[in-house]
Amino acid sequence: MQIAVAGAGLAGVFAAKTLADAGHEPILIDKGRSAGGRMATRRIGQGKADHGAQFFTVRTRTFQQEVDRWLEQGLIKKWFGDDHPRYMVPEGMNMLVKRMASAFDLHLEERIVRMEADAGGVVLAADSGSIFPADAAIVTFPPPQTAELLHRSAIPGTEEAVEELEALTFRPAIVGLQPLKQHLLIGSNGILDRDLPDGIEKMIAADQKGISTEPILSVYMTGEWSKHYFEESDEVTARAIKNALAAWNTVSTEEIQVKRWRYSEAEQTHSGAWMQAETLPLYFAGDAFLHEDDTSGKTRVESAVLSGIAAAEAVLKQHR
C-alpha cells in the first residue's frame, strides 16, 4: 500500500515509522529544507541554539519505550528533573527528527498546495509541479493550514473536517536568538522561566544547556507580546526583544535573529489522537490531536508522537 505523509515533523516521522514497521514504504513530504518541524535548531557562527521545542517529557509507556531506546543509543540525554525528567538532544533538537526521517523516501522543499481524494485514493500536488499519488494520506500540518488546503482543494465530503480543523486555534510565538560576548549562567540548568522582564516567557542558554560551544541565548516571548509584534519587521521585533533584555545586560555586537512560529501552541485541542475526512482515505494528525486519556490539554512533543502513531494505525486498520 502506498501512503503519503505530508509534514516531516515528529507526527509525520512517527506515522511513517509506524507504516514502515508494518511493511509499507511511506512517502514523506515536507516544504522545508530539512525535516524537523518545531524540533528546530539554528546554527549561528560556530554555535547553535534550539528555537522550537527545548525539551520533552514522557507520560506514556508507548513513548517511554522509544525514549529508552534513544537513551541507549546516546541520541538524547536527561537535561534536568527527577519526577518528570526533561530530555534534550545534545546535537540540537532537530537532529533527532532528521535522523529518523532519513530512513524514509523523503521529499524536501515540496509545498503541498492542492489535494484530490475519493474512495480510490489521494493525490497530493506540490507547487514545484510534483505529484504524489497514494492509496491514503496522513496530513500533519498545523490544523489551520490543513483547513486552508482543504478549502483550496474543494474536495467533496470534507466540509465537516474543515469545520473541526478551523476550530483548533493557535497562539503564535516569537523567539529571539541572541549571540553573547561571554557565557551567561541563568538558573541552575540554563533555563529561566520566572521573574523575567515584561514580554519574556523564558530564556535558555544554549551553551549551559550543552548543545553549543558558543554562548547563545534563546529568548521566548509571551503569546500576547508575540501577537503584537508578529507582523512587524525583523528589525523592529529584534529591537523590541533587545529592549526587553536590557535589564539582563546581554548587549552583543551581533543582531538578534528572529524566528516566528505562527502555530506555536494550540489554544483549542482536538479530543482524539487523529481525524479522518468523512470516509475518504485522508487523515489528520499532529500535536494538537490529543489522545482521549491525555488530560493535560496541551500540545507537546509527546502528543505529536502519539498522534502520528495513532493516525498510521488507523490507516493500517481501515486500508488493509
Image (spheres, rainbow, N blue to C red):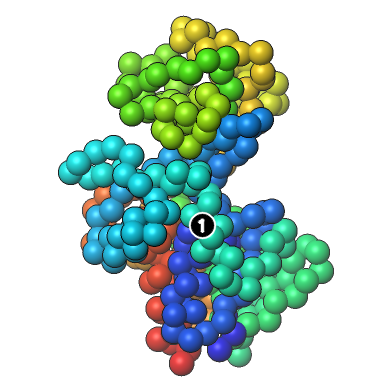
Q: Is residue 177 above or below residue 70?
A: above
Task: Please give the name of the residue rendered at 54% of the width and 60% of the height, measured from the top-left corner.
Answer: 99
Q: Residues within 10 Å of mark 1 (few under 14, many from 20)?
A: many
Q: Residue furthest right?
A: 129
On the image, the x and y values in percent for residue 159 come to 55, 69
Task: Please give the name of the residue rendered at 30% of the width and 60% of the height, measured from the top-left corner.
Answer: 68
Determine the image quadrant of residue 28: bottom right
Q: Is residue 144 left or right of residue 185?
A: right
Quarter of the picture containing the N terminus is bottom right
Q: Total number of numbered labels?
A: 1
Task: Please give the name of the residue rendered at 47% of the width and 62% of the height, measured from the top-left corner.
Answer: 11
Q: Residue furthest left?
A: 83
Q: Is residue 132 above or below residue 260?
A: below
On the image, the x and y values in percent for residue 295 come to 24, 53
Determine the image quadrant of residue 114: bottom right
Q: Is residue 62 above or below residue 80?
A: below
Q: Amino acid at mark 1?
A: Val
On the image, the x and y values in percent for residue 130 come to 78, 71
Q: List the residue tagged with mark 1.
A: 97
Residue 226 in sight here: no
Q: Is residue 92 above or below residue 75?
A: above
On the image, the x and y values in percent for residue 62 come to 29, 66
Kind of element beneath mark 1? helix
Q: Is residue 55 left or right of residue 179?
A: left
Residue 207 in sight here: yes
Query: Along the line of sight, which residue is nearer the eye, 123 or 71?
Result: 71
Task: Please give the name of the residue rendered at 18% of the width and 43% of the height, measured from the top-left corner.
Answer: 83
